[in-house]
Image (cartoon, grey):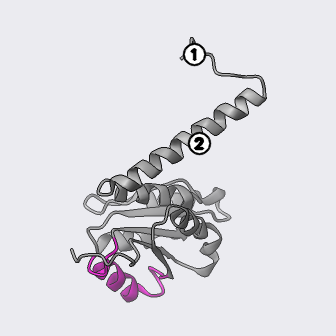
C-alpha cells in the first residue's frame, strides 16, 4: 500500500445518491469530530459501475485505509466496493419506504464468501465512522486513547443522567 500523506483523507465516504447525504453526513461529522480526514463522494454501483470499480481498486494507492459505503434500496454499493479492494469496507444501509430499510440492510449484509462487508444498523452512519476510527486506531495509539476517552465520557454522561433521576448505580448489583 502507498504511504498516506499526513493531510490526505484516510476514510472514503461514498454514497449511491445525493439523497443519502442526510444519513451519510453523520459519518463525515463524526470523523471530523475525531480529527480524521475523509472525503465524501457520490458513486453509484448501478449508474456508474466503472467509476465504482475504479475508485475501489485505486483507493489504497490513494492513501485511504477504510471505505464507508451507504446506499438505500438495491444497496449494492458496499459490496461493489469490497469486490474491488482489500481495504475494510463498512456498509451503511439507508432507510427506504420498504419495511424501514430492511431491503437495504439485507442487500448490504448478505455478501458472498470472500467479499466481506462490515455492516452497521440502518442509518447507522455515525457508528460506521466510529468503527472506521477503531480500525485506524489499531495502528494509532493516540486515536485509540481518544476513542477510549470518548467511551468514558459517554459512560459518565449516562451515570450523571441516572443520578439526576435519583437512580444512582448500585455497585452491589454489578
Q: Secondary structure at mark 1?
A: loop
Which class describes the residues within 10 Å of circle 1: few (<14), some (14-19), or many (20+)?
A: few
- Which residue is the site of mark 1? 171
Q: Secondary structure at mark 2?
A: helix
Extreme residue in the right direction: 165
**Percent of width and height locating residue 52:** 39, 82
**Percent of width and height locating residue 145:** 41, 48
Marks 2 and 1: in contact by CB < 8 Å?
no
33, above or below 149, in the image? below
**Percent of width and height locating residue 86:** 26, 68
Looking at the image, tell me whether mark 1 or mark 2 is earlier in sequence order.
Answer: 2
68 lies left or right of 93: left
Identity of the residue drawn at 31% across and 53% down: 138
Q: Nearer the viewer, residue 42 or 36?
A: 36
Identity of the residue drawn at 77% across and 23% down: 166
**Percent of width and height locating residue 169:** 64, 21
99 lies left or right of 142: right
Q: Nearer the viewer, residue 133 or 156?
A: 156
Identity of the residue drawn at 52% across and 43% down: 151
7 lies left or right of 24: left
Q: CA distance from mark 1 to mark 2?
A: 19 Å
Q: Which residues are magenta?
A: 42-64
Which class describes the residues within 10 Å of circle 2: few (<14), some (14-19), or many (20+)?
A: few
Extreme residue in the top direction: 172
- Which residue is the site of mark 2? 154
Query: Would you say residue 84 sits in the magenta stretch?
Result: no
Q: Nearer the viewer, residue 136 or 13?
A: 136
Amino acid at each position: 500500500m502507498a504511504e498516506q500523506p499526513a493531510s490526505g483523507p484516510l476514510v472514503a465516504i461514498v454514497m449511491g445518491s445525493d439523497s443519502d447525504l442526510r444519513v451519510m453526513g453523520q459519518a463525515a461529522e463524526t470523523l471530523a469530530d475525531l480529527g480524521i480526514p475523509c472525503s465524501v463522494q457520490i458513486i453509484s454501483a448501478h449508474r456508474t459501475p466503472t467509476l465504482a470499480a475504479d475508485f475501489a481498486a485505486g483507493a489504497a494507492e490513494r492513501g485511504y485505509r477504510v471505505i464507508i459505503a451507504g446506499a438505500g434500496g438495491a444497496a449494492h454499493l458496499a459490496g461493489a466496493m469490497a469486490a474491488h479492494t482489500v481495504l475494510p469496507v463498512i456498509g451503511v444501509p439507508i432507510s427506504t419506504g420498504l419495511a424501514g430499510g430492511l431491503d437495504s440492510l439485507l442487500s448490504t449484509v448478505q455478501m458472498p464468501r470472500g467479499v466481506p462487508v462490515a455492516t452497521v444498523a440502518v442509518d447507522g452512519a455515525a457508528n460506521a465512522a466510529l468503527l472506521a476510527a477503531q480500525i485506524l486506531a489499531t495502528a494509532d495509539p493516540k486515536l485509540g486513547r481518544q476513542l477510549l476517552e470518548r467511551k468514558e465520557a459517554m459512560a459518565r454522561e449516562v451515570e450523571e443522567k441516572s443520578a439526576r433521576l435519583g437512580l444512582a448505580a448500585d455497585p452491589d448489583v454489578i
